[in-house]
Image (cartoon, rainbow, N blue to C red):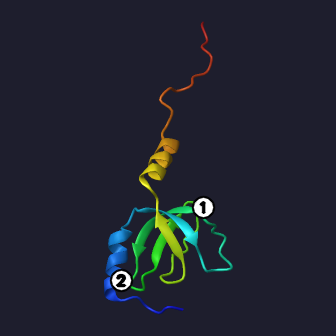
Amino acid sequence: MFGFPSEETVKSLREQYPKGTRIALNYMNDPYSKLEYDDRGTVDHVDDAGTIHVRWDCGSGLGIAYGEDSCRKLTEAELAEEQKMTEEPEQEESGPEMSM
């Protein structure tokens, strides 16, 4: 265990991972976690212990513990790909027309 980070480290983590930042998991030192490498989530906040609290896309709420776990910010290309995947199709499909 690494202990608590300094105030400067917590401040830096908060600047690097503000609320809404999209991240991917590199490693979690928790044998009971079902999270896997490259699972993605959205940062909720960083607490005074340096834990990055995340709303994982899979529904988990486990935090990234300072000094134990590892994550990275998504790249611009990854963010663009996610955005592309969530956009609605421009053309709506309609059912067959019926005449009366």
Q: Which residue is mark 1?
A: 58
Residue density around tag 2, few if under 14, some if 14–19, many if 20 or more, within 10 Å = some
Q: Is residue 55 above or below residue 90?
A: below
Residue 15: horizontal and vertical position, in percent?
A: 32, 71
Percent x, y of residue 48: 38, 84
Instruction: Give the mark count.
Output: 2
Give the residue at x 64% y 67%. Answer: 36
Quarter of the picture holding the N terminus? bottom right
Residue contact between numbered discs 2 and 1, judged by CB atoms under 8 Å = no
* Quadrant that contains the C terminus: top right
Which x, y percent locates residue 34?
A: 67, 70
Instruction: Please tell me in which quadrant of the rendered image residue 32 appears.
Output: bottom right
> Residue 9 got which mark?
2
Residue 58: image quadrant is bottom right
Mark 2 vs 1, N-terminal side: 2
Q: Nearer the viewer, mark 2 or mark 1?
A: 2
The residue located at (50%, 66%) in the rendering is 55
- Looking at numbered disc 2 in the image, what kind of residue is underneath it? Thr
In-front residue for pair 31/86: 31
Residue 18 image offset from top left, x and y in percent: 36, 68
Q: Amino acid at mark 1?
A: Cys
| Element assignment for label 1 | loop
* Residue drawn at (49%, 84%) of the image: 67
Vertical arrangement, residue 40 with respect to residue 87, above or below: below
Q: Which mark is residue 12?
A: none
Report the residue that reaches farthest toward the top.
Answer: 100
Q: CA distance from mark 2 to mark 1?
A: 28 Å
Element type where label 2 sits in the image: helix
Left or right: where 48 falls relative to 63: left
Q: Residues within 10 Å of mark 1 (few under 14, many from 20)?
A: few
Q: Residue at x 55, y 60 (%)?
A: 57
